[in-house]
Amino acid sequence: MILYRPVGLRELELIAQANFKAFPPRLPEQPIFYPVLNFEYAKQIARDWNTKSPPSYAGFVTQFEVEQAYFEKFEVHTVGNCTHQELWIPAEELEEFNQHIVGMIKVVAAYYGESFAGKRVAL
């Protein structure tokens, strides 16, 4: 199953440190990891929310595949309109989730806010 994850610059750096094979552990105030089911929803979060958030003012959309049988273990949650679908992975299960990623995590889109001060990456 193809999934997407909108991330900020710091999370993207941690994914790169894991050789694009795993997502980093959640912070204590983040009880769930939520990959989303479609690019449009991930793009909306990365472009409309992450680009307005300090410290990086940048948002990226990652794409990755998870084994279908493992994906089916989780309930799909619709959190807005019909395109706002995501999985809710408990933070304590993220390490196991990472083991079911097939191949590499890819960066498929990048968005930068007006306050972004770093080097822009061309995809």
Image: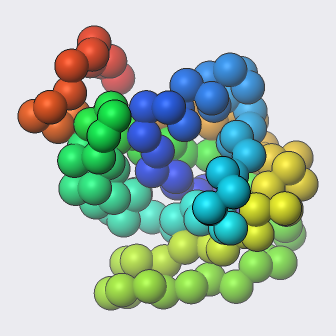
Residue 61, x across and y down, in percent = 42, 44
Which quarter shows the C terminus? Answer: top left
**Number of callouts in the render?**
0
Classify residue 107 as left or right of residue 97: left
Taking the spot 22% from the left edge, 47% from the top edge, the residue there is: 52
What kind of colouring is applied to the model shown? rainbow
Considering every residue shown, the one lying at the far top of the view is 119
**Which percent across, then down, holds residue 5?**
52, 52
Instruction: Identify the image quadrant of residue 84.
Output: bottom left
| Residue 25 visible in rendering | yes
Residue in view at x 55 percent, y 73 percent: 86
Q: Residue at x 80, y 47 (%)?
A: 98
The quadrant holding residue 66 is bottom right
Query: Who is closer to the viewer here, 115 or 3?
Result: 115
Please determine whether, in this image, residue 102 is positioned above or below residue 56.
below
Q: Is residue 67 visible?
A: no
Say whether residue 20 is left or right of residue 90.
left
Identify the image quadrant of residue 117.
top left
Counting from the top left corner in percent of width and height, residue 15 is at 63, 31
- Along the line of sight, the residue nearer the viewer: 93 or 87: 93
